[in-house]
Image: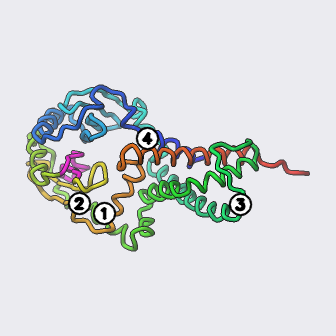
Amino acid sequence: MVLALLGLTGAILVHRDAWIALPHAADARVADPAALAVATARLMADPAVRPQSILYASDGFGLLRLSYTEGAGAYADQAGAIVRRWDSQWERPELWLFDLHHHLFAGDIGEVVIGIAGLCGLFFVMSGVVLWWRMRRTFEFRLWPRRLTRPGIVRHHRDLGIVVAPLLLLSLYTGTVMIFRPVAGAAFGPGTSAAVEKSLEAPKPLRVPLSDKVDWAAIVRGAHARFPDAEIRLLALPRKDSGLIAIRMRQPEEWLPNGRTMLWFAADSGRLVAARDARSFGRQVRGYNMLYPLHAAKVGGLGWRIVMTLSGLALALLGSLAVWSFWFRRPKRRL
């Protein structure tokens, strides 16, 4: 049931940017650092309504997404004008669908449940390939079972499963690795998890308060000056008492939609504290950073989105029919 749910929600989320029908959602991405600096300063100027973070527009989605406390948020155009606000994720289908797909509405516990389901899914696919091989001479490709009987569903499950097995292995493995990072060692070798952890480390906390006089425009301009070829993706206020304003950027070589090139600025003065270029990462970290874009179809354009949609729909179909045959088409026991 969990795998069917993940497959269906994943297939929908792959096309999320296309079905958010809001004004300016289809606008071209503004790449001019000066314009981005002005928009950022406009949004961050008033401490009373300042967002916790800004996710900037991308090539496929022309709005900024602002995050506030307690699940509130807003979309703004690239000039900084608010387009739509919400007080809870339940007001935005793309947000609660994302939470369902990633956490089952249960936070960290739900994430662990999903990870375990992903590991089970990998076992199902690999064991299914072995079982199909014994019955390969009866193979018949059908999108839907010939009959909704238990034998018909089992045969359809086996034959459709072997066709989509490579896609399911990719979807399940990339999803599981993002939850259980040590699993990445199967693809990139021992030490991958530790290398990824090190690549995500932030500088030591400054433990300074966030000043109301921070020059937000200067921070954005400084980030672009440090990495002129990179695209700014995210600005976040200090977490807890770290005293560090974080900027996340994406280099042209990066597949990750938000990149892993990072800069940290002091929350009291706006000075640059540290910077990290994703192009300096080793092979293991670069490989790991390619998994999410493959999983969420953030590379490859429409063609790969269609491929991953088929993977999600196949998982939803196989999972739901398996549940149907187990609960409602089980042979009756003879007394």
The residue to which callout 4 is attached is 13
Give the mark nearest the N terminus, 1 or 4.
4
Give the mark nearest the N terminus, 1 or 2.
2
Q: Amino acid at mark 1?
A: Arg
Q: Secondary structure at mark 3?
A: helix
Q: Amino acid at mark 2?
A: Ala
Dominant secondary structure, magenta? strand
Marks 2/4: CA distance? 27 Å
Q: Secondary structure at mark 2?
A: helix
Q: Amino acid at mark 3?
A: Arg
Drawn side of residue 194 relative to residue 158, left or right = left
Q: For residue 88, which quarter of the picture?
A: top left
Marks 3/1: CA distance? 42 Å
The count of marks equals 4
The residue segment tinted magenta is: 230-250
Seen at 37% across and 31% down, the residue is 20
**Residue 137: mark:** 3
**Residue 286: mark:** 1
On screen, 186 above or below 176?
below
On screen, 167 above or below 10?
below
Residue toward you, 28 or 226: 28
Give the mark nearest the N terminus, 2 or 4.
4
Please tell me how crowded label 2 is: few (under 14), some (14-19), or many (20+) other residues with Cα within 10 Å. Answer: many
Seen at 39% across and 43% down, the residue is 302
Q: Is residue 139 magenta?
A: no
**Residue 278: mark:** 2
Q: Secondary structure at mark 1?
A: helix
